[in-house]
Image: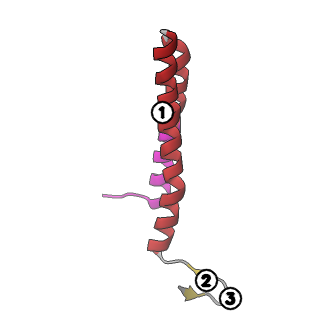
Amino acid sequence: MARKSNGKRKMTALQEFEIMKLVLDKFLWLGFIVMGWGMYLTIRDAAILPGLWYMLGGAVLLLLFLIIIVKEYEIIK
């Protein structure tokens, strides 16, 4: 790690990416768990609407995950 003039260390791009990957991976798992819970409720109760709200909530979490990744790393072709 390179030292800055104020005594703080600056992370390399690879180190930043690895930390961001660990944090954003939790959003991914959370989104799929919420969607899976919604699917379970739909099958258990034989009613689509209660489980659908959970599935939509999980989809929103996954979209949030996508927006954060794109915003952070500015994927440009």
- Residue at 51% x, 27% y: name it: 56
Of marks 1 and 3, which one's residue comes earlier in the chain? 3
Identified at 43% across, 58% down, the residue is 74
User: Which residue is pictured at 69% across the width and 87% down the height?
Assistant: 6
Q: Does the magenta stretch include residue 30?
A: no
**Residue 52 in the image, given as x and y percentages of width and height:** 50, 19
Kindly identify which residue carries mark 3.
7
Q: Which amino acid does label 3 sit on?
A: Gly
Relative height, residue 26 to residue 54 (above, below): below
Residue at numbered disc 1 = 59
Q: Name the residue under label 2.
A: 9
- The one of 3 and 45 positioned closer to us in this rendering: 45
Of helix, strand and loop, which one carries label 1?
helix
The CA span between labels 3 and 2 is: 7 Å
Between marks 1 and 2, how big is the CA–CA gap? 37 Å
Type of amino acid under label 1: Ala
- In magenta, the rendered stretch is 61-77
- Whether residue 64 is visible, yes or no, is no
Q: What residue type is labelled 2?
A: Arg
Could you say whether the residue bearing mark 3 is in a helix, strand or loop? loop
| Labels 1 and 2 touching (C-beta < 8 A) | no
Q: Position of residue 4 (x, y in %)?
A: 61, 87
Q: Does the magenta stretch include residue 62?
A: yes
Q: Is residue 9 above or below residue 50?
A: below
Q: Distance between the residues labelled 1 and 3?
A: 42 Å
